[in-house]
Amino acid sequence: MASFSMETIVCVLVILCSVMPSLAKVYTTWANGKTFSVGDQLVFIYASDHSVDEVSSSDYSTCSAGNSITSDSSGATTITLKTPGTHYFICSMMGHCSSGMKLAVTVA
């Protein structure tokens, strides 16, 4: 399993509706085997008709954003990973998460 010890890892994810059906594989492949450290950052760049919501494991599984931990729809979201564990992110726009617009990352 790869481990990254850099102070800040910047991941730019460009979210485009035109590629939405293939996003599940893209995000899963990108995150697979990566371990992040506390203090690393994820940077999401996306169109205005999307969002980045951090959610619980169960909300990630069901694509529910009703109890989001954080939410942003500015088009440029930076998340600093502050605690160890798995962090879950989804797009809360209808149908987007269930089409694969979601990402889980592990923080060591």
Image (cartoon, helix red, strand yellow):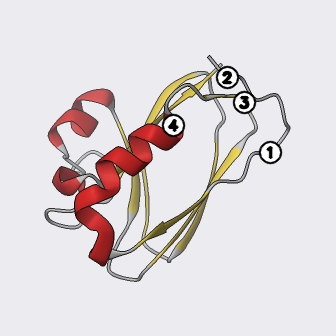
Q: Is any atom of residue 69 visible in this view? A: no
Q: Secondary structure at mark 2?
A: loop
Q: Secondary structure at mark 4?
A: helix
Q: Callout 3 environment at 10 Å: few (<14), some (14 to 19), or many (20+)?
A: some
Name the residue beneath numbered marker 2.
2
Q: Secondary structure at mark 1?
A: loop
Report how far apart the C-alphas of labels 1 and 4 lie in the structure.
16 Å
Q: Amino acid at mark 2?
A: Ala
Of callouts 1 and 4, the N-terminal one? 1
- Considering only vertical position in the picture, is 41 above or below 92? above
Q: Amino acid at mark 1?
A: Thr
Of callouts 4 and 3, the N-terminal one? 4
Q: Nearer the viewer, mark 1 or mark 4?
A: 4
Q: Nearer the viewer, mark 2 or mark 1?
A: 2
Q: Nearer the viewer, mark 1 or mark 3?
A: 1
Q: Position of residue 65 (x, y in %)?
A: 25, 51
